[in-house]
Image (cartoon, rainbow, N blue to C red):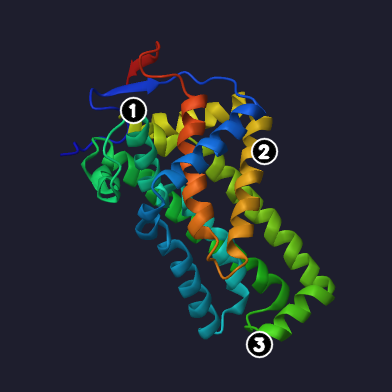
Amino acid sequence: MASFHVMSDARGMHVQPKVRRITTADLKDALRLGVEDFWAKPSHYVFLCLIYPIVGLILTRWSSGSNAIQLVYPLMSGFALVGPFAALGLYEISRRRELGMNTSWRRALDIRHSPALFSIAAIGFMLLVLFLLWIYTAQAIYTGLFGSQSPASVGGFLREVLTTSRGWMLILLGNAAGFVFAVIVLATTVVAFPLLLDRDVGAVSAIETSARAVIKNPLQMALWGLTVAVLLVIGSIPLFAGLAVVMPILGHATWHLYRRTVEPERAQQVRRPM
């Protein structure tokens, strides 16, 4: 059973795992290994990953049916903000495959027994809050430019966005705000969830380690974030169906990126009382 500790590890210590400098070759290698993990047992991902495009379609239909067409794009793009949490099962499969353990899809649910469960949940809740803040921000930008009136139709909204100055301003401000949220998520979770699955260090340490990894490898992490964004867009184009392939590859690749970015536990690490 998981013990209730979030701020520190099970011993009440704040752990600071060492982070490495990585190269572009490490990013390519992480993606290559992610593809290998995906093809090793692809049948598992029907359960783990098809939920992603299904939820995407539900969100699109809900927002359109609720006369909230302007929120379709924020929902599509913002859903990626909770992607690091949604990929937990994929990290676990990669971890077990790396150790030569049983990689049955049922084993992906073993994360519920993790001693870091509450830390994982805490960071997951943080991502949910960021997602809701992003939707609120997107709606506020739309209201500031177009008023409180919702678009009458999809076609009319697209014409307004693509052919008017306030439409272009909506695109500019919306994407700028989305970029800020994406950077926050990348900086705080790029290795946080894999780290917590690998060892119980506490939510604060996991977030801090992600931030130190980004600070130490700014160009590589920016390239990684861009790669993730491009692949998610490509996967979303065919009615989200491509995400059933893109998501597992990115999830597995994130595990391998963590392995290249954070020193193994046997390496010296700093501990201090909380």
Q: In which quarter of the image is residue 175?
A: bottom right
Q: How many labels does the image show?
A: 3
Q: Which amino acid lies under the numbered mark 2 shown in the image of this protein?
A: Leu
Task: Give the number of the disc on residue 249.
Answer: none
Q: Position of residue 101 (x, y in %)?
A: 27, 34
Residue drawn at the location 66% of the way across and 83% of the way down: 154
C-alpha gap between disc 3 and disc 2: 37 Å
Q: Which amino acid lies under the numbered mark 3 shown in the image of this protein?
A: Ser
Q: Where is residue 256 in the image (x, y as percent from the top left)?
A: 48, 33
Secondary structure type for disc 2: helix
Above or below, 33 relative to 66:
above
Q: Nearer the viewer, residue 248 or 116?
A: 248
**In the rendered structure, are the residues bearing label 3 and label 1 in contact, judged by CB atoms less than 8 Å apart?**
no
In the drawing, does residue 270 fall left or right of residue 112? right
Q: Identify residue for label 1.
A: 201
Secondary structure type for disc 3: loop
